[in-house]
Image (cartoon, coloured by chain):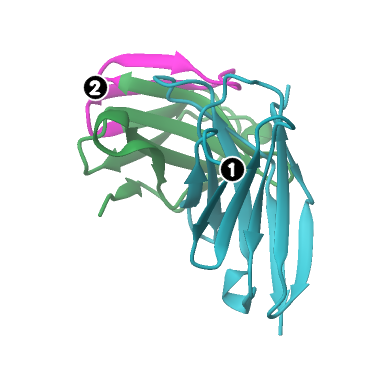
Amino acid sequence: QQQVKQSPQSLIVQKGGISIINCAYENTAFDYFPWYQQFPGKGPALLIAIRPDVSEKKEGRFTISFNKSAKQFSLHIMDSQPGDSATYFCAARGRAGSYQLTFGKGTKLSVIP
Amino acid sequence: DVKVTQSSRYLVKRTGEKVFLECVQDMDHENMFWYRQDPGLGLRLIYFSYDVKMKEKGDIPEGYSVSREKKERFSLILESASTNQTSMYLCASSSEARRGPEQYFGPGTRLTVT
C-alpha cells in the first residue's frame, strides 16, 4: 500500500521555467519530509527537507511548500536549468525514532534548453 | 563526507545462485538500509538494521536475508536468485543521534538474474 503519492511521473520544463512536483500522504504521524535528487548512475542524495511545523522552506532555487491540513507537500524549482534534469523522490518518515522512510515513486524531470 | 560504498556496480547471476551484495559505510552510523529501485515503483525498503546483529523487515523482505556482523558493514543475501529479483539495489545509512534522519545512499548495484 503506497503511503506517499507523487505526481507527475515525468515532467518537461523549459530552461528558466518553474518545475513543480507534488506529493500527498495519508499518515498523520509522518514528521519529516525530505526530497531526494538522483542523477543517472548515482544513488539518491538529499536535496531539501521540511518538518510539519513549518509551511515553507527555501534553499537557493529549491523550495518546499507544506500544507499540513491538506496532507500535501511540493517541491518548486525556480529558474530550472538543464543540470537539474534528474529523478526526484519525495519521502516521509513515520515518527521520531522511526528509521524508515517511505518514498514516492519518483518524478523524472527534463529541463530543455 | 559520508561515504557509502557497494561492492559491485554491476552483477550478472544465474537463476538459483546465492548472491551477496555488500555495503560499507565509513561514518559510524547506527542505521543501515537495503532498498530496491525499479522503474515506476520508486524505492522500496527490503530490510534495515539499527545495530549490529539487529535487523528488521521492510516492505518487501521475501526472498532476501541480511547480515550485520560489524557496524560498518551490511550485507544483502539472495538465497536463490530469481529473474524477478533483477533490479537496482541501493544501500543507505543514517545516524539519528549525529545527523538526524537524513539517509546517505551508495551508488547502487545493478543486478541482472538470467
Q: Is residue B70 magenta?
A: yes
Q: Which residues fall within the magenta stretch?
A: B51-73
In the rendered image, residue A12 lying in the magenta stretch gets the answer no
Camera-side residue: B54 or A92?
A92
In the figure, the shade used to draw chain A is: cyan
Q: Which residue is mark 1?
A: A55
Marks 2/1 in contact by CB < 8 Å: the verdict is no
| Residue B114 visible at all | no
| Tags 2 and 1 on a common chain | no
Mark seen at residue A67: none
User: Which residue bears the numbered disc 2?
Assistant: B69
Residue plotted at (36% across, 31% down): B32
Q: Position of residue A84 (x, y in %)?
A: 59, 69
Where is residue A59 shown, x and y percent of the image? 48, 60
Q: Residue A82: x percent and y percent?
A: 63, 77
Dividing the image into 4 quarters, which one contains the C terminus of chain B? Answer: top right
The answer to whether residue A41 is above or below residue A95 is: below
CA neighbours of label 2 inside 10 A, class few (<14), some (14 to 19), many (20+): few
Disc 2 secondary structure class: strand
- Compared across the picture, whether B98 is left or right of A27 comes to left
What is the distance, in whole Å, between disc 2 and disc 1 at their CAs? 42 Å
Position of residue A68 relative to residue A97, above or below, is below
